[in-house]
Amino acid sequence: MPVYQGSIRDLEKLNFTINEAKVYLTLINIGSSLAGKIAEDAGLDRSSTYNALKSLMEKGIVSTVYENKRTIYVPSDPKKIIDYFKEKEEIANRIIPILKENYSVKKEKKNILLFKGFKGLKTVFQDILDSCNEKDEIYVMGSEGQFNEMMPYYSPIFRKGKELKKIKTKMLIRDNIIKKDKGKYTEYKKIPADVSSPATINIYNGKVAIFVWEDTNPEAILIENERVSKTFKNYFNFIWKNAKPVK
């Protein structure tokens, strides 16, 4: 079996284990087969292969047929992966209203939150989408292309979410930064090329999100405070007035 490392990494992002990804890709490649053949082509021992097959069957993306008293494993249409996550989404939609009731009653108000790792950053980006609509405006400073480079799968989803909600954005970028894909509802202005920043600041709806783009462990600081947000917005507007329009 040709091992498609990119596909394995993508399946891992969908919560497949490495062994599950290898087994599923093997089945897709060779078709319906016995466990021994799958193990051989996937480069796994029998025990690991059986465990992966059992998990894939529970996910509904592998099934079995019996021929001559032998168990044949059959890969389902890859579209079943989407069906699996739609089922998870339905479960989440049922339980979230109950959880939110308890959360709103019991949560302790915290004005400053720290999020670590790419999943943490996604939480903050999702908060931006959830907190804003077409009447709001997001103000962005220090955008250096790190979002696209370090989160290539999620950044298009975030941009699409902004466009669907028609959220307007004002973005300050350095003079030497070239924006290949300009947002539909985004206005750009340029500041001098030597004004660099390892962090990106998003100001929105009474909040300030500061994204610190460390290579292996990025972090985000979310400040929920109207006065602080207004102060950052005033700084932004001062710079915006003196910045150069992007032609």
Image (tube, grey):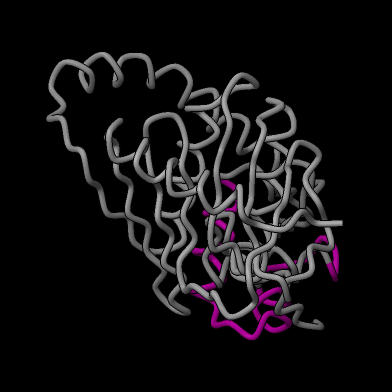
Q: Is residue 155 left or right of residue 105?
A: right
Chief SS of the magenta region? helix
Q: Nearer the viewer, residue 211 or 216?
A: 211
Residue at 55% over, 29% down: 89
User: Residue 35 magenta-drawn?
Assistant: yes
Residue at x-position 53% and y-position 33%: 88
Residue at left 59%, top 54%?
14
Q: Is residue 30 above or below residue 130?
A: below
User: As rendered, which of 125 and 228 lies closer to the eye?
Assistant: 228
Q: Position of residue 209 (x, y in %)?
A: 40, 48
Residue 240 is situated, as x and y percent measured from the top left of the image, at: 59, 49
Q: Nearer the viewer, residue 225 or 214?
A: 225
Instruction: Check the image and name the residue furthest to the front.
Output: 242
| Image quadrant in which you'd find residue 233 | top left
Residue 135 rendering spot, x and y as whole percentages: 61, 19
In the rendered image, the vertical position of residue 180 relative to residue 41, given as above or below: above
Where is the C terminus found, in terms of image quarters?
bottom right
Q: Number of callouts in the render?
A: 0
Q: Residue at x 72, y 67 (%)?
A: 34
Q: Which residues are magenta?
A: 29-58
Which quadrant is home to the N terminus? bottom right
Question: Which residue occupies the foreground of this view, 121 or 60?
Answer: 121
Query: Is residue 188 found inside the magenta-colored segment of the image?
Result: no
Q: Position of residue 182 (x, y in %)?
A: 81, 51
Is residue 245 toward the left or the right of residue 220 in the image?
Answer: right
Quadrant in the rendering for residue 45? bottom right
